[in-house]
């Protein structure tokens, strides 16, 4: 039985298809889950869902009247949504988030999903809604579905089209557009909901109303489709962050949300949006529904009229223009996962970085070993949370803290606030085990501990959190990652923090980690930068140039 969903995932994973990190992670999640066996991939169900798409016909432009032939990326998305199931046969995914630039066919794909939910999902009284902030926007997907249904004889025979919606009398099912300005949205019982251009949603009311209404359905689906926006405080950006957390977390078997499917077509950090070679990453339908010559003209216009640059980045390349950009190349970071034998490091020289958090949050100490036993810089993190806050922080941060503690990646201190004496004793144990040259710390929160550790013989050095202090080690850390000159053994907590970290630049283009740019945790990376800063001070010569490894 042909499995075009897995074929696409393998092609992306093997770099046969140009794809950004988030698309690669979505495909790797699929391949990982095939092996894990927690859920079942029903190839027949996926094939039938894709087959339903192929009975539909275009009604606009040059393809009007032609059957819809979904592209491989569209088959991957729809086949994943309908193919992945629980062992009892229910569909796995209740939510699907698809972020892709304009003119890549996402509205047609959403209408396709809505029609399948209306007539071919075996759900009595299937209530389908297209939802948006304004009724005109909500009607876009619904209008596409109406015209598609009219041009398919088998659907036209079942569906009655009225100005208020599409109706199937035989099953008492309906498909209607809804918007925030609808008089009342209480009492809804959606089987499928299609959220259109979610980046424009001012708050999470629409999302919550649909989510709560789906509670009585056996296998509901909330499909969220959008391009990038600029409101990083809105519900869309929070959903996007959640998708990224899901995609980051699956590789450890740490299912952050195994009912949430997500895929984001955009450019990778560091890609030049003006370089045509990068454009297929963000535009999977380039050359099909999206014309190369039109995209070229839009980019050219943005180069001539700088005020248009942000618009082109958002709409054509799916780049959020108000969000702080993430810093480290996570593809390269993942390749720095060499194993570490702690026994070999005993009594080896190292430098510590200590980042004390508020009394109830994550706190980090990082031991950094210059090249010696290993040819790379070797990172040994120590990350702490109050034991009584594990449940709370796991719910808020949506990270598997209890599992990480069980696996030894996270240490807990007694009580519900950080026990500084516990951390002090742990640092002294590090000093007894390794040859700690010195420890850098942020004086804002750690003066008392630093004084106490200094009295125990640990050389403590203040490192204020500005560009003058952290600029050089931040830049050098970036180069170490790009050159695969770092070794962190795939530590999952540190990897999560690396993915969270954004940087702030000064007028001279110096960088440092920016704690204000995200609500997520970056303490381990800040501690790593401080440890590297101390190591650089002890070098006899300036840090050596790092050869950036291409095409790793």
Image (cartoon, rainbow, N blue to C red):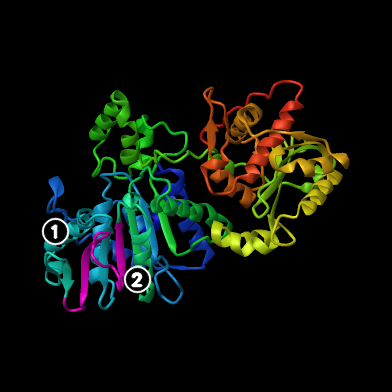
Q: Position of residue 37 (x, y in %)?
A: 51, 67
Indicate whether 392 appears above or below 61. Answer: below
Instruction: Compute the Cα span from label 1 to label 2.
Output: 28 Å
Viewer can see residue 441: yes
Report the front residue among 358 and 436.
358
Q: Residue at x 44, y 41 (%)?
A: 323
Q: Is residue 174 magenta?
A: yes
Q: Which mark is residue 237?
A: none
Mark 1: secondary structure:
helix
Q: Which residue is depicted at the point 42% across and 68% down?
A: 92
Which residue lies under the disc numbered 1?
147
Q: Position of residue 417 (x, y in %)?
A: 70, 57
Is residue 402 located in the magenta-colored stretch of the structure?
A: no
Quadrant location, the N terminus: bottom left
Which quadrant would residue 119 be assigned to in this image? bottom left
Tag 2 residue: 213
What residue span does the magenta drawing correspond to? 169-195
**For the residues carrying marks 1 and 2, which lies nearer the camera in this image?**
2
Crowd rating for badge 1 (residues with CA inside 10 Å; few <14, some 14–19, many 20+): some
- List x then y, in percent, for residue 165: 17, 66
Residue at the location (56% across, 32% down)? 549
Q: Upstream in the sequence, badge 1 or badge 2?
A: 1
The answer to whether 537 appears left or right of 467 in the picture is right
**Picture coordinates of residue 113, whole percent (x, y):** 28, 62
Q: Is 88 left, or right, of 134 in this rendering?
A: right
């Amino acid at each position: 039985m042909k499995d075009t969903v897995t074929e696409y995932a393998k092609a992306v994973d093997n770099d046969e298809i140009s794809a950004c990190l988030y698309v690669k992670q979505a495909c790797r999640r699929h391949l990982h889950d095939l092996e894990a066996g927690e859920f079942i991939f029903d190839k027949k169900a996926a094939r039938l869902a894709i087959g339903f798409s192929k009975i539909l016909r275009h009604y606009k432009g040059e393809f009007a009247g032609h059957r819809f032939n979904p592209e491989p990326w569209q088959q991957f998305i729809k086949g994943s949504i309908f193919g992945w199931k629980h062992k009892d046969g229910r569909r796995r995914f209740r939510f699907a988030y698809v972020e892709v630039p304009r003119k890549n066919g996402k509205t047609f794909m959403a209408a396709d999903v809505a029609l399948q939910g209306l007539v071919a999902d075996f759900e009595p009284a299937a209530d389908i809604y297209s939802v948006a902030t304004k009724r005109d926007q909500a009607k876009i997907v619904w209008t596409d579905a109406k015209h598609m249904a009219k041009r398919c004889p088998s659907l036209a025979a079942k569906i009655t089209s009225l100005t208020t919606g599409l109706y199937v009398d035989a099953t008492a099912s309906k498909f209607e557009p809804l918007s925030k300005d609808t008089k009342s949205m209480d009492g809804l019982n959606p089987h499928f909901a299609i959220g259109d251009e979610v980046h424009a949603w001012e708050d999470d009311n629409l999302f919550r109303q649909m989510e709560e209404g789906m509670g009585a359905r056996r296998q509901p689906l909330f499909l969220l489709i959008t391009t990038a926006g600029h409101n990083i405080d809105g519900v869309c950006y929070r959903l996007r962050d959640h998708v990224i957390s899901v995609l980051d977390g699956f590789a450890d078997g740490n299912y952050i949300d195994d009912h949430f499917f997500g895929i984001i077509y955009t450019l990778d950090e560091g890609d030049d949006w003006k370089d045509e070679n990068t454009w297929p990453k963000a535009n999977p339908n380039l050359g099909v529904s999206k014309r190369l010559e039109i995209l070229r003209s839009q980019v050219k216009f943005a180069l001539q009229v700088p005020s248009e640059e942000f618009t082109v980045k958002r709409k054509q390349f799916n780049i959020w223009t108000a969000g702080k950009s993430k810093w480290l190349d996570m593809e390269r970071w993942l390749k720095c996962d060499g194993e570490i034998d702690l026994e070999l490091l005993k009594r080896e020289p190292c430098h510590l970085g200590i980042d004390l958090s508020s009394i109830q949050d994550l706190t980090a100490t990082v031991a950094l070993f210059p090249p010696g036993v290993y040819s790379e810089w070797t990172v040994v993190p120590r990350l702490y949370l109050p034991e009584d806050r594990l449940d709370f922080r796991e719910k808020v941060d949506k990270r598997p803290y209890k599992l990480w503690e069980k696996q030894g990646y996270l240490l807990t201190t007694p009580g519900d606030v950080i026990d500084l004496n516990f951390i002090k004793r742990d640092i002294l144990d590090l000093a007894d085990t390794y040859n700690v040259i010195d420890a850098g710390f942020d004086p804002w929160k750690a003066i008392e501990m630093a004084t106490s550790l200094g009295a125990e013989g640990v050389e403590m050095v203040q490192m204020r959190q500005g560009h003058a202090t952290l600029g050089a080690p931040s830049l050098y850390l970036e180069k170490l990652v790009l050159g695969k000159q770092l070794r962190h053994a795939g530590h999952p907590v540190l990897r999560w923090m690396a993915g969270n970290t954004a940087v702030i630049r000064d007028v001279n283009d110096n960088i440092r980690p920016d704690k204000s740019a995200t609500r997520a945790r970056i303490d381990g990376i800040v501690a790593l930068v401080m440890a590297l800063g101390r190591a650089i001070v002890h070098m006899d010569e300036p840090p050596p140039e790092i050869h950036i490894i291409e095409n790793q």
